[in-house]
Image (cartoon, rainbow, N blue to C red):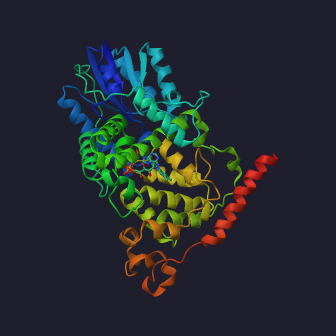
């Protein structure tokens, strides 16, 4: 049988269920990647550069195994239909993806392929357990993380999902023309893309850092987390490989067990947010807690620009935003503080921040980004309660106690020693170029509480 494997966020050869399924029973099989102009957008974006570098690595890996990677520009439903007509492929395989945008795209492809008489097979690959596989006692999706995690781990123990070896690749369908992969210059700050780089990073992290992960993960100055988010986002490594390796380590190395289990918990947050998106696709446009759609937001374009550019006058917020702009990645603690600041201090609609993060992050992922934003804005499933509002200064003093993170990203403040760096308004002569705070946190906190309460009250009255 002639088969096409349509790869999207599964850019690896090992433990890749799209490829395994496509190889099974195929005499000829061609892996395809469609460069959708909407997906490609601005080639300077970190996410796009990382993707293109990853595609180049994948093509090398496939070629070394006697296969190939066919790349075509265009909209997926057009490209795949043309390819089926051109090659006479009888079957197209891809992995399922949550979210309204992905569902619409896949449905259009399915309809187009149906017209050509090609069979579609979809597989689970993006997450370990799909939304319908981890349900509460009433058979409904969980709305709270901890019971979800417990049920998830029970599910894994009862029926673990095993890592699959790379398949034996049948030869590619002959005579197919591939478009060129666009070239981009390597950008400083981005991690190396591709499966080999992802696996090296995973095993180095498990070897050297995971044992201290539970203690160190919240300190943005430390290099204590895996930095695998972009690789996971594009499927350059599978979540199965990561969780399987971490749980094996927890079994065999008592000293690393607590850290490895904590790391697995974070990967289960990823699964949780994918399940939330699959079960509640409205979250891409609206609050998961619908009453908070009524929060009155500020337009404040000047405040938004200051936030984006890292000049709010709150050092920890500015450090995070500058790390994002310069490297395409931001530490999780800084993401939480920056997102809370936008929604609760600037009172700007979290969706504007979500879009900015999505565009700027190398790991920008519709499910995790939406989940993170709705958590910080208190509008999401198992979110931070709205009355618990981060104070950016005390967060900074707790999680960047020597000011090292801020000093690295906000050099105008480097003359202020130690923890005092987080209160530059007390030492204006040492940092004359640094802006004064654009809002007063205490005042904005009260205003945020008023607005969230009003939204909640309105929904009860209405
Ligand atoms: C406002 C906001 C936006 C975010 N946007 C994204 C995003 O677009 N893409 C993204 O992958 N993560 C996002 N996160 C989650 C988290 O910040 C990153 O996954 C993490 O910082 C990536 O670094 P790491 O790979 O070193 O993580 P590690 O600490 O090593 O964690 C391992 C993996 O677990 C997953 N993970 C960890 N924390 C979370 C979490 N809170 N939610 C979901 N998955 C998690 C990631 O895949 C990560 O690579 C966001 C968090 C917030 C608060």
Of residue 318 and residue 326, the one placed in the foreground of this image is 318
Point out the residue furthest to the right here. Answer: 461
Quadrant, the C terminus = top right
Which residue lies at the image location 54% right of the left edge and 55% below the top edge?
353
- Of residue 435 and residue 143, the one placed in the foreground of this image is 143
| Quarter of the view holding residue 160 | top left
Tally of numbered discs: 0
Residue 40 visible in the picture: yes
Residue 176 is situated, as x and y percent measured from the top left of the image, at 27, 23
**Which residue is outermost to the front?**
254
The picture places residue 116, in percent across and down from the top left corner, at: 44, 15
**In the image, residue 259 above or below residue 166:** below
Query: What residue is at 37 percent from the left and 37 percent from the top?
Result: 239
What residue lies at 53% left-to-right and 42% top-to-bottom? 145
Residue extending farthest bottom: 429
Locate residue 383, reporting x and y percent: 58, 49
In front here: 185 or 245? 245
Q: Nearer the viewer, residue 19 or 2?
A: 19
Whether residue 48 is visible: no
Identify the residue at horizontal 39%, vertical 77% (top origin): 418
Looking at the figure, which quarter contains the N terminus? top left
């Amino acid at each position: 049988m002639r088969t096409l494997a349509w790869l999207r966020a599964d850019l690896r050869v090992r433990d890749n269920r799209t490829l395994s399924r496509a190889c099974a029973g195929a005499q000829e099989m061609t892996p395809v990647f469609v460069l959708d102009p909407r997906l490609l957008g601005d080639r300077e974006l970190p996410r796009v550069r990382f993707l293109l570098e990853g595609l180049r690595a994948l093509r090398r890996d496939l070629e070394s195994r006697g296969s190939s990677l066919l790349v075509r520009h265009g909209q997926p439903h057009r490209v795949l239909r043309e390819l089926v007509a051109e090659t006479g492929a009888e079957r197209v395989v891809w992995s399922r993806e949550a979210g309204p945008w992905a569902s619409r795209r896949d449905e259009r492809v399915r309809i187009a392929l149906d017209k050509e008489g090609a069979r579609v097979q979809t597989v689970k690959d993006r997450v370990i357990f799909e939304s319908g596989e981890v349900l509460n006692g009433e058979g409904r999706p969980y709305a709270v993380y901890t019971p979800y995690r417990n049920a998830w781990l029970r599910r894994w123990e009862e029926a673990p999902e095993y890592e699959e070896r790379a398949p034996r690749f049948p030869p590619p369908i002959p005579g197919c023309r591939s478009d060129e992969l666009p070239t981009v210059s390597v950008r400083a700050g981005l991690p190396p893309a591709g499966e080999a780089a992802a696996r090296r990073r995973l095993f180095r992290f498990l070897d050297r850092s995971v044992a201290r992960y539970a203690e160190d993960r919240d300190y943005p100055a430390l290099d204590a987390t895996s930095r695998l988010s972009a690789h996971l986002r594009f499927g350059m490594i599978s979540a199965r490989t990561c969780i399987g390796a971490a749980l094996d380590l927890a079994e065999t190395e008592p000293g690393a067990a607590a850290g490895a289990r904590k790391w697995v918990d974070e990967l289960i947050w990823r699964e949780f947010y994918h399940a939330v998106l699959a079960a509640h696709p409205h979250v891409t446009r609206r609050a998961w807690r619908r009453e908070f759609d009524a929060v009155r937001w500020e337009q404040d374009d000047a405040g938004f620009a200051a936030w984006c550019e890292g000049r709010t006058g709150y050092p920890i917020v500015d450090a995070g935003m500058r790390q994002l702009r310069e490297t395409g990645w931001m530490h999780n603690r800084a993401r939480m503080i920056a997102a809370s600041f936008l929604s609760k201090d600037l009172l700007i609609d979290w969706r504007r921040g979500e879009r900015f993060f999505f565009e700027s992050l190398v790991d920008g992922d519709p499910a995790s980004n939406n989940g993170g934003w709705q958590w910080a804005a208190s509008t999401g499933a198992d979110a931070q309660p709205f009355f618990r509002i981060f104070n950016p200064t005390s967060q900074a003093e707790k999680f960047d106690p020597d000011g090292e993170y801020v000093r690295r990203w906000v050099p105008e403040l480097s003359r202020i020693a130690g923890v005092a760096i987080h209160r530059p308004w007390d030492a204006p002569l040492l940092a004359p170029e640094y802006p004064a705070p654009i809002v007063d946190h205490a005042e904005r906190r009260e205003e945020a509480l008023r607005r969230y309460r009003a939204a909640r009250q309105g929904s009860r009255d209405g």
